[in-house]
Image: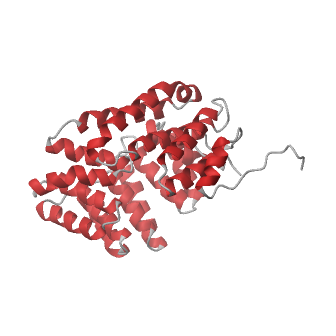
């Protein structure tokens, strides 16, 4: 090995992060390690610096440009939102994230990640609007959106006053319960969600409670609840929960759930199958290591002329790439 050949460095401490960020050369992998170490230390300034350097130093024409740019941009936007210590201080951070993304979206567009930029700008615009409203419905929607950006702590701050003021508001109770689950507060989550179910048997409440039961170590009850939700209403939401709950059981339970989802996707032979349900089935098979069966579903989606947009398009590209045993533009480079 020649003396000039680049040697990757281990990043384990904040001092390592500072040293690497001060050096003239750093790989994408090293910068992502800097992000992880900074996050563990809750040093958001260093986390932002590492992610932004990864974004700016990625070649937009490179083979993994889409993955590198979207990963680092996601981290930067997340960093702005993480910086807000309370709900009342979130507005300026949302505005700053929006400004950053608009000023850098040309790199994303050039690399072929325009859909990603559009999706994030839409989310930030919605957050900006609903943050300014005190209406109960807006507060519940705010909680839901905050859960999507990993700020369930602030989501609880938004939804809890609504649930306290209107203890028969099922959407508020359901969203609050789901946010409690995100934070690992399973006892509170179950209590709130069962209160919602006593008021109305809603499929989203059933889905949220199934997840609480699974994550608190009650897989059999979780699967039963997921089956009830799927029987109540067939949707991507209930299908995803059914497959997740069944994956934690024996292979027969998983196969049964998979068959139910595939059957529901093709319930009307005169119409195109529900490709979103089929995508969920293919992803579940990939997660289970059954790539050959996932290939069959990918071929069925393509055979019906199915096409996706936004995050679903990226998910399909990943599954398709795994099925073909090839790297996807949205996946990290192979070692």
Tell me where residue 130 appears, x and y as whole percent. Answer: 24, 37
Q: Residue placed farthest to the right in the image?
A: 2
In the image, taking residue 68 as reference, residue 185 lies left or right, namely: left
Q: Residue at x 44, y 73 (%)?
A: 249
Q: Residue at x 69, y 41 (%)?
A: 23
Tell me where residue 166 appears, x and y as whole percent. Answer: 9, 54
- What kind of colouring is applied to the model shown? secondary structure
In the image, is residue 178 above or below residue 45? below
Q: Residue at x 46, y 72 (%)?
A: 252
Looking at the image, which is closer to me, 200 or 49? 49
In the image, taking residue 257 as reference, residue 37 lies left or right, namely: right
Residue 55 at least partly seen = yes
Residue 29 at least partly seen = no
Looking at the image, which is closer to me, 273 or 218? 218
In the image, is residue 235 above or below residue 231? above
Q: Residue at x 21, y 63 (%)?
A: 193
- How many numbered discs? 0
Tell me where residue 80 appears, x and y as whole percent. Answer: 42, 41
* The quadrant where residue 308 appears: top left
């Amino acid at each position: 090995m020649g003396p000039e050949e680049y040697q990757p460095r281990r990043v384990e401490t904040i001092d390592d992060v500072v040293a690497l960020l001060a050096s003239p050369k750093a790989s994408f992998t090293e910068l992502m390690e800097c992000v992880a170490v900074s996050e563990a230390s809750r040093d958001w300034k260093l986390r932002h610096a590492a992610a932004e350097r990864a974004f700016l130093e990625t070649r937009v024409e490179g083979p993994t440009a889409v993955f590198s740019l979207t990963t680092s941009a996601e981290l930067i936007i997340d960093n702005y939102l993480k910086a807000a210590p309370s709900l009342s201080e979130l507005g300026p951070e949302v505005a700053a994230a929006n400004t950053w993304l608009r000023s850098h979206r040309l790199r994303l567009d050039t690399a072929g990640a325009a859909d990603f930029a559009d999706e994030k700008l839409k989310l930030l615009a919605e957050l900006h609007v609903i943050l300014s409203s005190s209406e109960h419905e807006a507060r519940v929607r705010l909680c839901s959106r905050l859960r999507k950006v990993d700020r369930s702590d602030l989501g609880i701050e938004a939804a809890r006053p609504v649930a306290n003021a209107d203890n028969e508001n099922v959407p508020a109770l359901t969203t609050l319960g789901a946010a409690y689950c995100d934070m690992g507060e399973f006892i509170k989550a179950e209590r709130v969600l069962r209160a919602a179910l006593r008021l109305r048997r809603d499929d989203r409440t059933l889905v949220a409670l199934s997840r609480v039961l699974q994550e608190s170590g009650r897989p059999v009850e979780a699967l039963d609840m997921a089956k009830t939700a799927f029987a109540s209403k067939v949707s991507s939401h209930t299908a995803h929960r059914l497959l997740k709950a069944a994956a934690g059981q024996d292979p027969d339970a998983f196969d049964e759930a998979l068959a139910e989802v595939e059957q529901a996707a093709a319930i009307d032979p005169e119409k195109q199958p529900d490709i979103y349900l089929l995508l969920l089935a293919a992803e579940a098979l990939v997660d289970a290591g059954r790539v050959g069966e996932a290939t069959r579903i990918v071929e069925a989606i393509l055979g019906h002329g199915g096409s996706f947009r936004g995050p679903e398009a990226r998910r399909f590209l990943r599954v398709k790439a795994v099925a073909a045993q090839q790297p996807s533009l949205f996946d990290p480079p192979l070692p």
